[in-house]
Each structure stands twice: as C-alpha cells, then as structure tokens.
Amino acid sequence: MRCANGCWFGLDSNQQLTIGPAVTTKLARLMTIQEPAGKVIHFVISKPNAGWVINGLLPFTAQVLQNKDELRYLDQWLYFTTEDVPRAYKYNGGDKKCPRCKDKLRKNDLVVQCPNPKCRLVYHESENRNCWTYHSTCSCGHSTKNELSWQPDPDDIPGRN
C-alpha cells in the first residue's frame, strides 16, 4: 500500500496492521522530508512505548526509516520500502525518445518511467503502445512488472518458514 506524507501506521477495525486511511488505532505517523540537495528522508513519529518495534528494537519517538525496515506490532509486521511501483502517466513534453520503439515521446502520451533511480528511462505504455511491458525488463534490468521488485526473504520472516 502506498503511503502519502503524514499517513498513519496502526491497526484497522479488524485489528490488522496497516497504513493509510483504514487505520483506526494509531501507533505512529509516517513522514517524509526532502533536503535542499534533493535527498529524501523518511521517518516515523510515535508515542513512547506504543508497543511496536522497528527491526526488533523499540523506536525513539522520532525514528528515521531505512529501505526494507521491518515494522512490527505483536505478531504482525509490515516492511517499509522506498521503492516506487511504476505507473502510467501523461508525458508533459520534452525532447526524448522511447528506448524500446525509438519513437519520439509526445506531450500527453501515456508513459511509464523506470523506477530504478540510476536509470529513470521513459517508455510508452498504453493499449496501442506497450513499450514498457513489451519485455520483462527495462534496458537497465529492472522488472517491468507493475509491482514492487523487492520482497522479504521468507526465511527471514519469523513464523513463516
């Protein structure tokens, strides 16, 4: 589930750990700030002794999050990731070509940008031009499935092996 800046981490009405608008019992607030140099910092703010842990340790009332951190409450857990899921959007123009079909990207074309921060290539992606999903990977090797590429190792999840 995607979390906008300022969303809540906690329990829903069925006492299941979640993030976002379904939270009814608030454990912590997820926040994001961007430094002037462009670096993004993710952190949580919580009440002291709220009963949840990050990577097995009690968090401070303000705690910086790192990619792949485990957020746990009792016997439930979520994983924090900074990875973006690729999504189609309307191209706003600029002098670029699609790396798959080599045609020019035009204003308002539906496109997908590779979420790999070292790549960020932009491909056509519509019913008529499925350049992004035409192949299983971007030219950088990142998967073109519209899902998170990182998943926790099942052997590392307590009670799931």
Image (cartoon, helix red, strand yellow):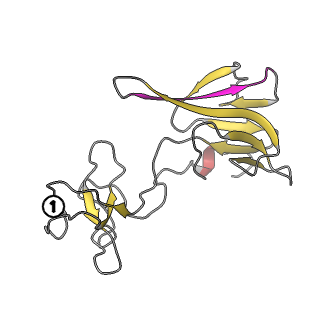
Q: Which residue is mark 1?
A: 97
Q: Residue at x 56, y 48 (%)?
A: 153
The answer to whether 28 is drawn above or below residue 131 in the figure is: above
Q: Nearer the viewer, residue 138 or 106?
A: 106
Could you tell whether 41 is left or right of 117 in the image?
Answer: right
Counting labels gives 1
Q: Main secondary structure of the magenta part?
A: strand
Give the residue type that dot 1 points to. Lys
What is the span of residues highlighted in magenta in the rendered image? 39-48
Residue 136 in the image: x percent, y percent? 33, 67
Residue 123, given in percent of the width and then of the height, sits at 26, 63
Residue 130 placement (x, y as % from top left): 31, 74
101 relative to 96, above or below: below
Q: Residue at x 34, y 47 (%)?
A: 116
Q: Count residues near mark 1 (Cα–Cα under 10 Å), then give few for <14, some for 14-19, many for 20+.
A: some
Point out residue 6 in the picture as x, y percentages from the top left corner: 63, 36
Residue 114 covered by magenta stretch? no
Q: Residue at x 32, y 70 (%)?
A: 125
Question: Dividing the picture into quarters, in which one does residue 9 lie?
Answer: top right
Q: Is residue 101 left or right of residue 7?
A: left
Q: Residue at x 71, y 49 (%)?
A: 21
Query: Disc 1 on helix, strand or loop?
Result: loop
Residue 154 relative to residue 77: left or right? left
Which of these two is toward me, 132 or 5?
Answer: 5
